[in-house]
Image: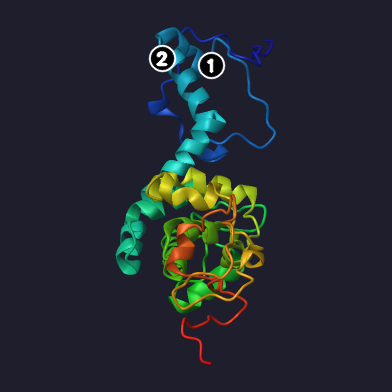
Amino acid sequence: MPDPIIPLFAEKAPHPFVSLGRRPAGARSEGQGRPPAGASRAPFTGASTLAGWRRSGVGPLVALAILLLGSPGAALAQKAGTGETIASAPIAEAAQRFNIPERWIWAVMRAESNGDLRAVSPVGAMGLMQIMPTTWTSLRTRYRLGSDPFDARDNILAGAAYLREMYDRYGDVTAMLAAYNAGPGRTDEYLSRGRPLPVATRAYIAKLASITGGSDDTRLAVAQPPDPFAWRRAALFPTRAGGSSTAATAPSKGTPAFPSAAAAEPVAPRQASLFVPLSDEITR
């Protein structure tokens, strides 16, 4: 009696839909639901589970969810949302510790990293508040922070501490933001010698106008820098004690106003005559 022929493949099952609730015990040996790297995906077939979902009416919803979750915009939104969720408590702590408004920290964090915990800029700034490596080293020592610059709490505390230091230095929110973005050295050069701020810094200040108190406080971003040649217009003749000059001097035209930060912390000496004031009483 000849051996019965055993087919290599079974015929198509009458009910191709496979319930996910009753998978065989070995089904999870392939991984945690992630396809192997570089593997191609099989097309929809009659025996496909997704094909069964499609016939049951669930397919369109599943496809839409896959498209939304797989889009770059959804990934960014998910990443930003995660960062902002984690940042809430540290921001409240930092605002209380350094006595600055929470909205300052929120605004700077969103402008700097958009809530990305692992953000690294082309120049090496790190984390939610985009702290430069050298600045991080200094701040973590002064404020006893941890060793990980990407830790949400420590990064936010460092950024808030730096905002407070720059505010104490200049006494002005706009100058504080300029120093946070371009550095205090560059901001000092702008205020003292009129070296223009970088275009990126001016755009940064304008972007954060919501925390600077309005257009009056954004003059640092849009106004002309202080005139470095104002000394040339000092009086060339002796002045009397009453303040009047022995020769009339025409006021300069178009001399720009100093930004508000300069009023809080003057960086240039007051202009004076080149000669000693004369007394109204002449000794003979």
In the rendered image of this protein, does residue 279 appear above or below residue 140? below
The residue tagged 1 is: 48
The residue tagged 2 is: 58
In the picture, measured across the screen, residue 120 lies left or right of residue 69, that is right
Residue 267 position, x and y percent, is 53, 71
Of 12 and 136, nearer the camera is 136
- Give the residue at the far bottom of this rendering: 284
- Mark 1: which amino acid? Ser
Q: Residue at x 49, y 32 (%)?
A: 74
Residue 149 position, x and y percent, is 52, 64
Q: Secondary structure at mark 1?
A: loop
> Within 10 Å of the Cα at label 2, are there few (<14), some (14-19), or many (20+) other Cα atoms?
few
> Colour scheme in the image?
rainbow
Q: Residue at x 63, y 68 (%)?
A: 231
- Give the residue at the far front of this rendering: 284
Q: Residue at x 32, y 68 (%)?
A: 97
Residue 82 numbered tag? none
Q: Residue at x 59, y 57 (%)?
A: 250
- Residue 89 falls in image quadrant: bottom left
- Mark 2: which amino acid? Val
Marks 2 and 1 sit apart, C-alpha to C-alpha, by 14 Å
